[in-house]
């Protein structure tokens, strides 16, 4: 049946009359409208960290809706769930005297972080610091600034130049960042934006010493460091914000996804006390920025319930405890003739990349493999030349093995199709 729903990142000429409709979820499983069960190997879009069907989160949101469903937090208005969530996140953050700016998702969080960074330099007497540097292969949402800084070229092209005062450097080189800061001029660079582990751009972990190296470099030049933890946070890398694994102190951290495990949309920016101080300590430095639904009480109530589950079940630590098991299960796939590389080992996420020459024979190889794996009861995430895996933190070893088995069988069938 032809649909009126325009799907993001989708070829609607294909999807319009061929939708895959899901109806319900339970832990790591989801069910379609015909009753078929699927292992959700990507936690939906990297976010169902506590799994599906957690009644506790639904009940917390419903209870809040019965009292006060929504209300603005502009000016001096607030609500208890927003206050409580901000305080809780500030206490978990890897920086002193942290403040929390709430948004409705990751894309808004990126835009907010960059605007805060630029505004910080203005109030510090350096209004020329507007340039933002990101990395190749990076994904920072699809809002205006996120599109403008995107390191995945396909996500930035076709819209015109959105953020001229931005540039990208090689994702794995501290020297490349140094050269770019010097080329632009340190006095003009506002911030460096990076994902601790690149997600949608290929599941790329940083080289040894990279994270500490770029943070030290930015400190040297007075450039603010924005860690994009939208995918990496809330247990995905085994810590609250992911970046703690490298023992560094960013200036700003963006978050979303796992903060509610996707039960309701919410995101935000954790801001180092030093960066927040001009706004909090000086009258007249108002940040004229914010979303209608920032601090939405029902969404914040869902986040608080989700964080309770993460803490009570020690689920944050499981992102690190299970990374070896996921890598061990998927690594044998590297021997398959259609596989170029298996990337796993930092957090509960991985990617299986296909051989470049396969796309000459079969341009649709990634989509085809994803469908073949789905037919075996496992849902994966398609990337440019790879499939990603990032299951809920509640997954058990037999289910991890089931993911690997579906990949192996799908690859074998794809090999027959490719000839």
Image (cartoon, rainbow, N blue to C red):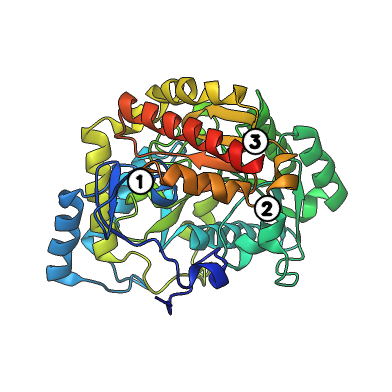
| Callout 2: SS | loop
Nearer the observer, disc 2 or disc 1? Answer: 2
Compare residues 48 and 313 and report the one nearer the observer.
48
Q: Is residue 155 visible?
A: yes
Q: Position of residue 31 (x, y in %)?
A: 27, 52
Q: Quadrant of residue 141?
A: bottom right
Q: Is residue 232 left or right of residue 166?
A: left
Q: CA distance from mark 2 to mark 1?
A: 30 Å
Question: Counting residues from the N terminus, which is met first, the one under dot 2 or under dot 3?
Answer: 2
For mark 1, what is the residue? 89
For mark 2, what is the residue? 152
Instruction: Give the position of the N terminus as an image quadrant.
Output: bottom left
Badge 2: residue crowd in 10 Å (few <14, some 14–19, many ≥20): many
| Callout 1: SS | helix
Compare residues 133 and 162 and report the one nearer the observer.
162
Q: CA distance from mark 3 to mark 1?
A: 22 Å
For mark 3, what is the residue? 215
Question: Counting residues from the N terminus, which is met first, the one under dot 3 or under dot 1?
Answer: 1
């Amino acid at each position: 049946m032809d649909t009126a729903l325009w799907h993001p990142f989708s070829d609607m000429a294909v999807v319009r009359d061929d939708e895959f409709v899901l109806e319900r979820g339970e832990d790591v499983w989801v069910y379609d409208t015909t009753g078929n069960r699927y292992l959700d190997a990507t936690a939906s879009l990297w976010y169902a960290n506590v799994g599906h069907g957690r009644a506790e989160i639904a009940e917390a949101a419903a209870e809040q809706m019965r009292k006060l469903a929504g209300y603005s937090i502009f000016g001096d208005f607030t609500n208890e769930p927003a206050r409580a969530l901000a305080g809780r996140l500030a206490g978990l953050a890897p920086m002193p005297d942290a403040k929390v700016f709430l948004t409705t998702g990751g894309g808004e969080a990126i835009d907010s972080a960059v605007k805060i960074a630029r505004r910080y330099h203005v109030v510090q007497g350096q209004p020329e610091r507007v340039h933002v540097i990101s990395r190749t292969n990076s994904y920072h949402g699809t809002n205006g600034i996120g599109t403008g800084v995107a390191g995945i070229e396909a996500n930035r092209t076709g819209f015109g130049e959105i953020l001229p005062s931005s540039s990208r450097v090689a994702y794995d080189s501290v020297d490349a960042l140094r050269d770019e800061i010097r080329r632009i001029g340190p006095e003009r660079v506002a911030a460096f934006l990076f994902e601790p582990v690149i997600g949608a751009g290929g599941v790329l972990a940083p080289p040894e010493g990279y994270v500490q190296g770029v943070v030290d470099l930015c400190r040297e030049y007075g450039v603010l460091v924005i860690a994009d933890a939208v995918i990496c946070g809330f247990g995905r890398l085994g810590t609250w914000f992911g970046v703690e694994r490298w023992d560094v102190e960013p200036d700003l951290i963006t978050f979303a996804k796992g903060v509610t495990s996707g039960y309701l949309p919410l995101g935000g920016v954790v801001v180092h006390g030093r960066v927040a101080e001009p706004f909090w300590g000086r009258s007249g430095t108002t940040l004229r920025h914010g979303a209608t639904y920032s601090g939405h009480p029902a969404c914040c109530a869902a986040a608080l319930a989700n964080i309770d589950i993460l803490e009570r079940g020690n689920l944050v630590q499981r992102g690190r405890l299970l990374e070896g098991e996921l890598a061990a299960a998927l690594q044998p796939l590297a021997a398959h003739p259609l596989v170029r590389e298996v990337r796993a080992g930092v957090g509960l996420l991985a990617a299986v990349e296909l051989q470049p020459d396969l796309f000459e024979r079969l341009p649709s190889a990634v989509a085809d493999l994803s469908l073949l794996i789905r037919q075996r009861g496992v849902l994966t995430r398609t990337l440019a030349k790879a499939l990603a895996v990032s299951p809920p933190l509640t997954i058990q070893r037999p289910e991890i093995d089931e993911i690997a088995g579906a990949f192996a069988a799908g690859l074998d069938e794809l090999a027959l199709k490719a000839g």
